Every structure is written in structure tokens, then in C-alpha cells.
Image (cartoon, grey):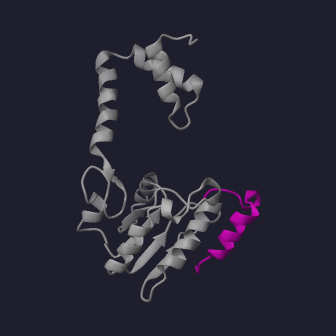
Amino acid sequence: MSKFAEPMARLIEELKKLPGVGSKSAQRLAFHILRSSDDDAEALAAAVRDVKASLRLCSICNNITDVDPCNYCSSPTRNQRLVCVVEEPTNIAAIEKTKHFNGTYHVLHGSLSPLHGVGPDQLRITNLLRRVEGAQLDEVIIATNPTVEGEATAVYLSQQLRRPGLRVTRIAMGIPVGSDIEYADEITMLKAMEGRRDL
């Protein structure tokens, strides 16, 4: 039997479904919502409903958007001949923070992971291949994460995307700025050596 009233227990159970939220965090959030004003609680509920009702995937790049095509794909100021492939929509924010990329994006919504049952058919690769066939692209930058799954995805995509006149590149990896070389693991050091450039 639950130690909380049924509505509170139900809210805690729903909050526990969120990534990174365990039982204690779910309880804290539930009690915070309970203590909030009716207006704040209703605003939270309305925001959740609005996200589900208003957001969808861009028909071109698969980014989460409220307009189709998204702002990146429809922008006349962005280089439509340059596509950066990322695993998740949240990766776009990290690239945009640099203020040095002016191309468009393609979101895979994951990476290849045979151990978890994620193959090419579970990712948004088909419309990337259609996009490459149907548009005049100069370069596709593969910006998947530097993990085993991300590397496997990058290798797979590089094989699928290879075409005459299309440059397929991978983001550089290596020693983070501000860190010490002596603490780098061998894979990081190897990537840093492979990605070296002229000064």
C-alpha cells in the first residue's frame, strides 16, 4: 500500500518515468508541484500539453519544431549545401553555441547499437540518403558522439553517403581545451594525433 494519497502516488510514478529521475527526486518534484500555486501548476500542465500538441519533426531534417520545415531548413541565410548529421536534437544547441556553423542539420534520433536492437532501420537515415540524392550538397559533416555507437554510426554513414563530388567529413576529436595530456586515455590521445593539423 502506498504511503501517499493516490493522486500524489500517481504523480510520483509518472515523474519517475523521466530520465535521471529516481524515487526521491520524483517525490521532491511532486511535493514542489503540490506546494506551487494553482497558476504555476496549471502553467506546467499546459506547457506539457502544448509540447505534445504543437511540436513535430521537421520533414527535411527531423529536428523538433513547431513549423515545417524548421527554421534551419527554411532559412535563406544558411548554407543549404552543407549538412551536419547529429544523433539528437539537443546536439544542435552545442554546435550553434560556437556561432561558426551556418549550414543545416540532419537528426538521426539515436545511433547504431546492435546490442540494444538499434539498426539502420530504427534511425532516420533513409530520408538523409534521399536528401543527398535529391539536393546539390557540397559536404556532409558527421557529428555523432565519440562513443563506440557513434563511431559505428559514422563509419556506416560514410559508406552509405559516398558519392562523386560529395565530401563526407567527421568532426575532430582529441584532448579537450584546458586539460592535461598526461590524463588523456589512449583512445583520446590517438584521436588527437590523427586529427592534428598544420600550424
Residue 146 screen position, x and y as percent: 61, 62
* Residue displayed at 62% across by 60% down: 114
Residue 162 within the magenta-colored segment of the rendering: no
Observer-nearest residue: 75 or 21? 21
Residue 183 within the magenta-colored segment of the rendering: yes
The magenta segment is 177-199
Residue 38 screen position, x and y as percent: 31, 16
How many discs mark residues in the rendered view? 0
In the rendered image, which quarter contains the N terminus? top right
Residue 190 screen position, x and y as percent: 71, 70
* Residue displayed at 31% across by 50% down: 56
Farthest residue to the bottom: give it: 164
Observer-nearest residue: 21 or 178? 21
* Residue displayed at 37% across by 59% down: 62
Locate residue 85: give its quadrant.
Answer: bottom left
Q: From what the image shows, is residue 88 above or below residue 32?
A: below
In the rendered image, which quarter contains the C terminus? bottom right
Q: In the picture provided, is 30 more to the left or to the right than 180?
A: left
Observer-nearest residue: 120 or 83? 120
Locate residue 177: give its quadrant.
Answer: bottom right
Q: In the picture provided, is 100 more to the left or to the right than 76?
A: right
Observer-nearest residue: 178 or 65? 65
Q: From what the image shows, is residue 83 above or below residue 32?
A: below
Residue 6 screen position, x and y as percent: 47, 13
